[in-house]
Image (cartoon, rainbow, N blue to C red):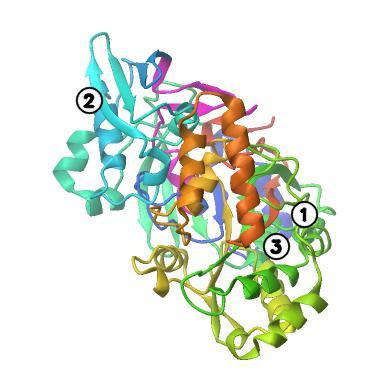
């Protein structure tokens, strides 16, 4: 076992680190507890890290980013709008019942049902139908041509119809049943989630008997846990934390560029950011280069669009945002009363508070009146998606990833007028986003995204800041390769000899 009390002497901790691999569990410190373990609900990192090991997805990505089989062994387009997938016939759920094509169809219908209210609906709402076919196959029909479909299916987890219908949504979230390499064991609310190795898994077995995901919001405590041997893997490391690990041969820092784009969201439905001049002033006040290189320094790169070079749809010609606090202050001074409207900046522990505080200071330095509101992640997510857009926070910091490597996965949910995440209502933008997600011509799609990025840039609809990098801390014996989609696949990890 690797769980140690924090006060143990370092010599004892190192002795535990030296235990044989077969005796080891894995303890992971997250920035917070999951908001949901139902894979069709929230897709925030702390939830995803856990439930992705409980469930199998229709397809997945390997460590090189290529789409590879999981529950679907192969697939083929029957037409421009029909994708036929062959479903594995040797998979059982954790309760011993077989996973069937009917479960796949049910999972698709569940996540695409507007009444179900999945926050992921915008990723899958191009799917018009799902049906079982002979030969253990499932056919998905889209409303129109949808070239990003397969990339989006990377995120579609398969749930057991018989369990969900028997226990209901709330109970399923409390005790989820999947078919993945780890079985749900226990959820001690506010403390930890424990998963146990699935001894009957059809694929690569996990190397750990148990995996304990703990909620540890304080970054210094996560680092201390790792240094003391109380944790084997910690997420949410920053460059300062990585430097603290450098002198300890028993631990290491691991990093990877991600497809996640960090941005400042603004409420366009009420002052002060309903005013386009003040949105421009807010943008001019932000030093993206200083945040990426001076504050973070872990490989983050400033961006001026809702995509990164890792995405299809990234536009080379979008000009960087200017940083000019003096001009920002001049604009604010011409609308001082409006700019002084109190603005709430919503955040949660999963986000780097150094960035949030830096953004607050930059905005206030030019004349805005911004105060930070810290809540837990579920409260933050609920506020960000409040039905009445005017009730959403005035500002929020986000780091959006779709794990699909396509601009559709970020631009559509954050910009399309009917998306539950969007604060934008612009018919021209909707038309371009529709064209980009339905055309089978890559050149047409690319051109549409270039126009989308330019509109966001010109109208300051929100403020992209940087392409994020992921930093982890791990014990030296843990073999783990970080990927751009920030997954913690337990059965792709191992202990070194």
Q: Secondary structure at mark 3?
A: loop
Report the mark closest to the observer, 3 or 1: 1
**Picture residue at 52% right of the left edge, 74% below the top:** 394
Q: Is residue 376 above or below residue 75?
A: below
Quarter where residue 10 is shown: bottom right
Q: Which mark is residue 107?
A: none
**Picture residue at 61% right of the left edge, 55% below the top:** 456
Q: Residue 395, image x and y in percent?
A: 55, 71
Q: Which residue is denoted by mark 2 in the rendering?
A: 102
In front: 465, or 173? 465
Residue 391 belongs to magenta span = no
Residue 444 appears in view: yes
Q: Which mark is residue 320?
A: 1
Q: With 233 as the anchor, is 78 left or right in this view?
A: left
Q: Is residue 329 above or below residue 206?
A: below
- Circles 1 and 2: CB atoms closer than 8 Å: no
* Magenta residue span: 46-74
**Picture residue at 69% right of the left edge, 77% below the top:** 363
């Amino acid at each position: 076992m690797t769980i140690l009390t924090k006060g143990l002497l370092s010599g004892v901790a190192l002795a535990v680190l030296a235990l044989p691999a077969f005796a080891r569990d894995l303890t992971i410190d997250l920035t917070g507890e999951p908001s949901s373990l139902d894979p069709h609900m929230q897709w925030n990192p702390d939830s995803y890290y856990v439930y992705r090991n409980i469930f199998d997805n229709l397809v997945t990505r390997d460590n090189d980013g290529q789409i590879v089989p999981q529950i679907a062994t192969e697939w083929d387009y029957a037409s421009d709008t029909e994708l036929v997938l062959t479903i594995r016939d040797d998979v059982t759920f954790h309760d011993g019942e077989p996973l069937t094509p009917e479960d796949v169809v049910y999972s698709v219908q569940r996540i695409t049902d507007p009444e179900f209210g999945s926050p992921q609906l915008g990723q899958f709402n191009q799917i018009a139908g799902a049906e079982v076919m002979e030969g253990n196959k499932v056919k998905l029909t889209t409303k129109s041509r949808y070239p990003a479909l397969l990339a989006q299916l990377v995120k579609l987890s398969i749930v057991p119809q018989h369990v969900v219908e028997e226990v209901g949504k709330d109970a399923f979230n409390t005790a989820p049943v999947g078919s993945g390499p780890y079985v749900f064991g226990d959820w001690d609310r506010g403390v930890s989630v424990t998963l146990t190795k699935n001894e009957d898994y059809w694929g690569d077995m996990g190397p750990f008997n148990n995996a304990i995901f703990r909620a540890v919001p304080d970054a210094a405590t996560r680092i201390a846990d790792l240094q003391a041997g109380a944790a084997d893997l910690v997420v949410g490391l920053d460059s300062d934390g990585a430097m603290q690990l450098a002198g300890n041969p028993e631990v290491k820092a691991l990093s990877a560029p991600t497809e996640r784009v960090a941005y400042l969201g603004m409420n366009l439905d009420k002052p002060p950011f309903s005013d386009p001049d003040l949105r421009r002033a807010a943008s001019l006040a932000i030093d993206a280069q200083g945040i990426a290189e001076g504050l973070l320094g872990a490989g983050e790169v400033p961006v001026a669009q809702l995509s990164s070079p890792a995405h299809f749809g990234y536009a080379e010609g979008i000009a960087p945002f200017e940083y000019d606090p003096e001009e920002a202050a001049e604009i604010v001074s011409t609308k001082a009363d409006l700019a002084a409207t109190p603005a709430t900046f919503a955040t949660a522990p999963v986000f780097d508070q150094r960035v949030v505080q830096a953004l607050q200071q930059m905005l206030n330095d030019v004349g805005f009146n911004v105060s930070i509101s810290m809540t837990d992640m579920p409260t933050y997510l609920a506020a960000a998606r409040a039905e009445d857009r005017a009730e959403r926070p005035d500002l929020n910091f986000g780091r959006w990833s779709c794990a699909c490597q396509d601009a559709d996965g970020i631009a559509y949910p954050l910009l399309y007028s009917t998306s539950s995440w969007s604060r934008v209502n612009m018919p021209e933008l909707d038309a371009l986003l529709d064209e980009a997600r339905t055309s089978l011509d890559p050149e047409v799609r690319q051109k549409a995204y270039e126009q989308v990025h330019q509109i966001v840039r010109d109208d300051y609809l929100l403020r992209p800041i940087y392409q994020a990098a992921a930093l982890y801390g791990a014990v030296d014996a843990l073999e783990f390769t970080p990927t751009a989609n920030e997954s913690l696949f337990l059965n792709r990890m191992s202990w070194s000899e």
